Amino acid sequence: MVKIIYKEADGIEHVLDVPEGMSLMQAAVDNGVPSIIGECGGQMACGTCLVYVDAVWRTQTGEPGDMEEATLELHADNPNAGKRLSCQIKATPELDGLVVHLPVSQY
Ligand code: FES
């Protein structure tokens, strides 16, 4: 299991033990974490699984690929750094303790 910490905009934290290989989106949806919707089921089509990777973790999570970047354009008016689609981040041992911040809204 990989510990992932989801922080809502108002500071509420959700700490999940995520099975290795599961996406952060799927874990959040399965556990009722607010603000993560995942309408397209992880197909990089909806952009409703946006998170902001905490600054100290961005090297470990890496940069979005071209297709992910295109979907992130749906949030182009949002200036926050570290934007990723949580459906494209899989839990790995290297990410144990990862902190992601949640947007106020996915729309
Ligand atoms: S779940 Fe739709 S883009 Fe991530």
Image (cartoon, grey):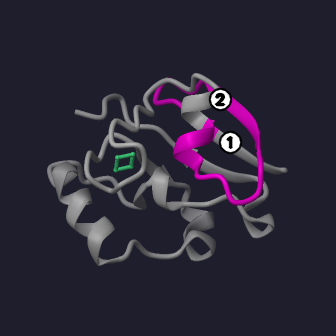
> Considering only order in the chain, which callout, 1 or 2, is on the residue closer to the N terminus?
1
Q: From what the image shows, is residue 18 above or below residue 88?
A: above
Image side of residue 106 versus residue 16, left or right: left
Q: Position of residue 24 (x, y in %)?
A: 58, 48
What element does badge 1 sit on? strand
Question: Is there CB contact under 8 Å for labels 2 and 1?
Answer: yes
Query: Few, some or many C-alpha atoms within 10 Å of disc 2 (few <14, some 14-19, many ≥20)?
Result: some
Q: Which residue is mark 2?
A: 13
Q: Residue at x 65, y 29 (%)?
A: 13
Per the rendering, the mark at residue 5 is 1
Write down the region rendered in magenta.
6-27
Q: Position of residue 42 (x, y in %)?
A: 42, 50
- Amino acid type of the residue that numbered disc 1 sits on in the rendered structure: Ile
Quadrant, the C terminus: top left
Does the image show residue 7?
A: no
Q: Position of residue 66 (x, y in %)?
A: 28, 77
Query: Few, some or many C-alpha atoms within 10 Å of disc 1 (few <14, some 14-19, many ≥20)?
Result: some
